Amino acid sequence: MNEIKIFSPATVANVACGFDVLGFALKEVGDTMYVRKSDKRGINITQIEGFNLSKNTFENVAGVSALAMLESLDINHGFDIRIDKKIKPGSGIGSSSASAAGSVFAMNELLNRPFSKDKLVEFAMKGEAVASQSEHADNVAPAIYGGITFVKSTDPLEILPLPVPEALFAVIIHPLIEVKTSESRALLPSSVDLSLAVQHSANLGGLVHALHTNNYELIRSSLNDLLIEPHRAKLIPYFSQIKSTMLKSGALGCGISGSGPSVFALCNGEDIAERILENLTKDLSNASFEFDVYSSSINNRGIIIL
């Protein structure tokens, strides 16, 4: 192949109790990217549709991750990248990670897969750092692996795919405001109370066990963010009302998606997801901001070739 078209999914990071280590991929929301081999060496971002983002290779997350991959190759050609951006930057559902992961996935396919998934995550993390000023894998890992992933370590990189209960659905509400990852991270404290850390660790362990055992009630009792949400909730208008509506509508649990402003809920079955969507739309009909809502099963494949 000389050219490829891919779908790179939106992702939810942190998943309440897994700050910087947990993430899952969405099936219904994502970017479309086109990558082709070029006789000219280097990486060239030819077009970005949807949002006004820099096409400078050294400033764009897709370009930076692609350059990181290119440095590990001995080839005499380059790549052109076109992005049809559907995920709003600053939305909290992995806009930058979709671009960063998508470019290296596509290049790897065009080169007959010389790199492992772990290596692709490492390249994509270089692009993520452009957006957040830190290399983290909780969005790019599920984009590349699919499903739900646990980042055991970033140095050395160790990604653990987790099982996904069949009936697990996600609901996302995205207030149409921007929250920059770097600014959201700046709100977080440098230290936390020991008792909170212990409780938070217990929730994370409980959630991982629940996924392995299809225990939806354990998922419900584990989806609690004791460390991050209290600091970031202030960035999200109507957060308390959104969370209340999700839980009263039957969500197993909910929380801030990534750095916000999107808020996610996990639920047992598509019917409950639809009920949450309906109630959110009704309860926020007089809100002072516009918002999008999505319902999606968990995307077990991650990035796919179209």
Image (tube, grey):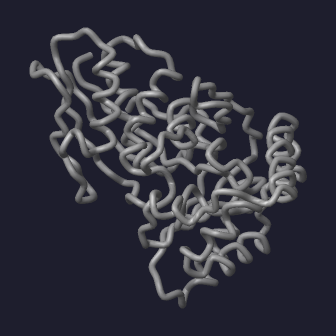
Image quarter (top left, top right, bottom left or bottom right) of the C terminus:
top left
Left/right placement of residue 47 relative to residue 60 reads left
Q: Residue at x 47, y 45 (%)?
A: 134
Most distant residue in the left direction: 40
Above or below, 218 relative to 42: below
Q: Residue at x 40, y 35 (%)?
A: 126
Residue placed most toward the observer, 97 or 245: 97
Image quarter (top left, top right, bottom left or bottom right) of the N terminus:
top left
Q: Position of residue 189 (x, y in %)?
A: 64, 62
Q: Residue at x 41, y 13 (%)?
A: 113
Residue placed most toward the observer, 128 or 271: 128
Above or below, 119 relative to 187: above
Q: Residue at x 50, y 58 (%)?
A: 92
Q: Position of residue 9 (x, y in %)?
A: 47, 43
Say whether residue 225 is visible: no
Left/right placement of residue 62 relative to residue 276 reads left
